[in-house]
C-alpha cells in the first residue's frame, strides 16, 4: 500500500492500471500477461512494477479497488436517492461486484496461495455499507428495523449465486427490497 500522496499523473497511471487489471483478470484469469495490462493501460511495464511489485499485489489492489467502489457508493447514493431506492441501487452494484469477483476468482486464489488475504476487511466493509443504508431507511420509516445487515448481505450473496441472469437478479432484488419495507 502506498503511503505518500502520488503526483496526479502517477495516480492516473495507477488508476488506469487497476481498471485494466480488473477487466483483464476477470476475463482472462490469473495468467494474463502483465505487459499486456501495462500496454492496454498506456504505460510501460516499469510503471506497472513501480506501483505493483508482484502479480499478487496487482490482483489484490484490483480487488480492493472494486470493494472500495462498492462500499463508497453507499453514502454517495444516500445523498441523491431516498434510502430504499439507494439500497436498491447499491444492490445492483453488489451484483456487479460479485460478478467481477467471480471472474477474478482464480487470480484471487493465487493471491491467497502466496500468503495474501484480499478478503481481510471485505465483509466488515460491506456490512457497514449495508448497515448505513438500512439505518437511513429505518430513520426515514421506509425500511424495517428488525432485519440485520448480515441477513441482507447473505440474501444478496444468495441472489448472485442463484440468479440465471441480470434480469432475474433484478427481479429478486426488487423482491428483497419489498420484503424489507414495513408492513
Image (cartoon, rainbow, N blue to C red):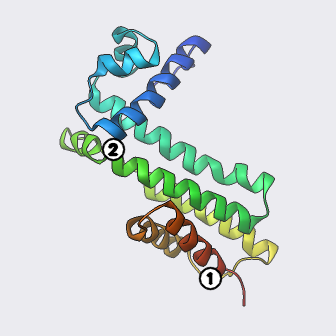
118 is higher (above) or lower (below) than 53: below
Q: Position of residue 50 (x, y in %)?
A: 38, 14
> Which residue is labeled 2 in the image?
104
Residue at the location (28% across, 24% down)? 54
Task: Identify the disc placed on residue 179.
Answer: 1
The first of marks 2 and 1 along the sequence is 2
- Contact, CB < 8 Å: mark 2 with mark 1? no
Mark 1 lies on a secondary structure that is: helix
Q: Residues within 10 Å of mark 1 (few under 14, many from 20)?
A: few
Q: Quadrant of residue 85?
A: bottom right
* Residue at the (78%, 73%) spot, across then down: 139
Cα–Cα gap, marks 2 and 1: 31 Å
Q: Is residue 61 visible?
A: no
25 shown above or below 38: below
Coordinates of residue 169 in the picture (x, y in percent): 51, 66
Find numbered disc 2 in the image and state the secondary structure of the residue it sits on: loop
Amino acid at each position: 500500500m502506498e503511503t505518500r500522496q502520488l503526483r496526479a499523473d502517477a495516480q492516473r497511471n495507477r488508476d488506469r492500471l487497476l481498471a485494466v487489471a480488473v477487466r483483464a483478470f476477470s476475463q482472462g484469469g490469473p495468467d494474463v500477461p502483465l505487459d499486456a495490462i501495462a500496454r492496454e493501460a498506456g504505460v510501460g511495464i516499469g510503471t506497472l512494477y513501480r506501483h505493483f511489485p508482484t502479480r499478487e499485489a496487482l490482483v489484490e489492489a484490483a480487488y480492493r479497488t472494486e470493494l472500495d467502489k462498492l462500499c463508497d457508493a453507499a453514502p454517495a447514493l444516500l445523498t441523491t436517492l431516498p434510502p430504499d431506492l439507494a439500497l436498491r441501487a447499491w444492490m445492483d452494484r453488489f451484483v456487479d461486484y460479485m460478478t467481477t469477483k467471480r471472474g477474478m476468482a482464480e487470480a484471487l486464489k493465487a493471491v491467497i496461495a502466496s500468503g495474501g488475504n484480499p478478503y481481510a476487511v471485505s465483509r466488515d466493509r460491506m456490512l457497514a455499507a449495508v448497515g448505513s443504508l438500512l439505518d437511513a431507511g429505518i430513520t426515514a420509516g421506509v425500511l424495517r428495523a428488525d432485519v440485520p445487515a448480515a441477513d441482507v448481505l447473505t440474501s444478496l450473496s444468495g441472489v448472485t449465486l442463484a440468479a440465471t441472469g441480470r434480469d432475474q437478479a433484478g427481479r429478486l432484488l426488487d423482491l428483497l427490497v419489498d420484503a424489507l419495507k414495513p408492513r
